[in-house]
Image (tube, rainbow, N blue to C red):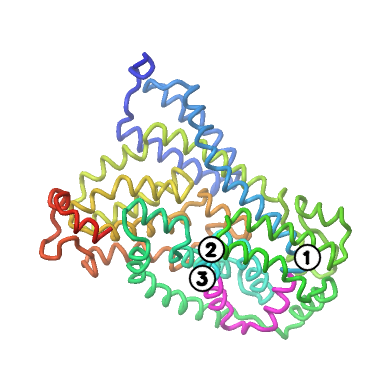
Amino acid sequence: MDKNEQSKKKLPFSVSLLLFLIVCVAIAIQKVLFKGDMGSMFLMLWVIIIPISMLFGYKSSEMEEAAIRFSSKALAPCFILLSAGALISCWIAAGTTPALIYYGIKLINPKIFLVSTLILCSIVSLFCGTSSGTIGTAGVAMMGIGNTLGIPAPITAGAVICGAFFGDKMSPMSDTTILASSISEVDIFKHVRYMVLDQLPLYIVSIIFFLVLGINYGGDINSPSTQQLLNGLDSTFKLGFPAFIPLIVTGVLLARRQSALLSILGGAVTGVLIAILYQNMDVAAAVNVFYKGFHIKTDIPALAKLLNRGGVADMWGLAGITLFGFTVAGMLDYLGVLQTLAEKIIKYIHSPAGVTTMTVIFGILGNAISFSQNFAIVMTGTLMRPVYTKYNLQPKCCSRDLEAGGTYGALFIPWNANTVFAVATLGVSAGDFLPYIPLIYLTPILVIVYAAVKFKLAKIYDELGYVDVTDRLARDPEKLKAIS
């Protein structure tokens, strides 16, 4: 062991907690008080985290290497962000989004629009296994229709997000669903079926929630402003079948389980071709839409707001937030901040409800520190999976709780990659849509309540109470096979 390794000390709980609080408070101040760019704050945090780490024997160079190495995990979310910007503008240029909005306004009853949005996004996400792909495609179109009907954007965004994340969570093709079941060592279909106990009643609650809001906010499709917008769309774009080809291409790619990135890019490039061949757009202008976004001069304010957006360039700032955020996450991970916090807190768990609560909390903290659902699920699952055996709880209890905190918990963190993507794509801040995602914030509460009252709490050995069965299970390969 070299001299540098010998000089390193494990960060005590107090310092780990301090670092975590510094990051959270700094971001909150920058976002809420200063209303500034979070990316710059993440970079400024370097001059706080690195000096503190040096007090415990770490070199500044190795901390920088850890930050850069971990930031490689941000490349995929960054590319998805940039591609989503291109998809938005290219679909507008191709007439895809205008056609969806045009026919959506004509066909959807405004009073049940929000419920329709919830169900549509749920179905798309369930069959495609991706919340980001759903938000970037069906979600964008529904936002346009909602704005036209006079429904506040945060409410429509809430319906989109609830549907997209519900379908993603319940889909056997979803990466987070696969990850949560894998890290918990439970069959994926057992995992999905067990989640029905909490997701089905809350999905019904969400339908009622959006039905009531829709009655209050449903717009009038016959109003002069709506008719002016419809006429503007009809006169600006050709709205026939070819306009839907980019949507079909994206849907087919997602249905064939291609990556969200490839599916979004495929839909964007197809949009460029349709803009040239069907909308008769200049070739150079259509290609530049991919990067610069779509822009049109019009005397209709609502039309300008709806169409003038998108492009890769529009997403660079948010991609920077994601990239810089991951550098901070890398340093905190290298210092073992979350592990230190977990080791301290686990000592105080004395019941199944405590196990569930800690799993949910660690999932949310993991999302806050790592900015990634996957990291949060892997870290929390690694820490908590053995604890469930100590309380005679089946692995599917762990995987369910992982999803409640690790998957849904991402939406509670404004700087998390998933939240940043939703904000960038839907054009609504996290603080604005948070009150309108009941499915997301009620799920962690319900699984904790279920654990507290021991409702359908699956035991490994039914004849025993909630006691440590680690040794017995190690000698019982048949039972181990049955529950995993």
> Residue under circle 1?
94
Q: Residue at x 70, y 83 (%)?
A: 106
Q: Which image quadrant for residue 12? A: top left
> Residue under circle 3?
122
* Range shown magenta: 98-122
Residue 227 spot, x, y in % from top left: 77, 81
2 or 1: tag closer to the N-terminus? 1
- Of all residues shown, which one is farthest toward the top? 3
* Element marked by disc 3: helix
Give the position of the N terminus as an image quadrant: top left
Horizontal side of residue 355 vs 234, given as left or right: left
> Residue under circle 2?
433
Q: Which of the two residues, 152 or 392, is positioned nearer the viewer here?
A: 392
- What kind of residue is marked 2? Phe
3 or 2: tag closer to the N-terminus? 3
The mark closer to the camera, 3 or 2, is: 3
Q: CA distance from mark 2 to mark 1?
A: 29 Å
Q: CA distance from mark 3 to mark 2?
A: 18 Å
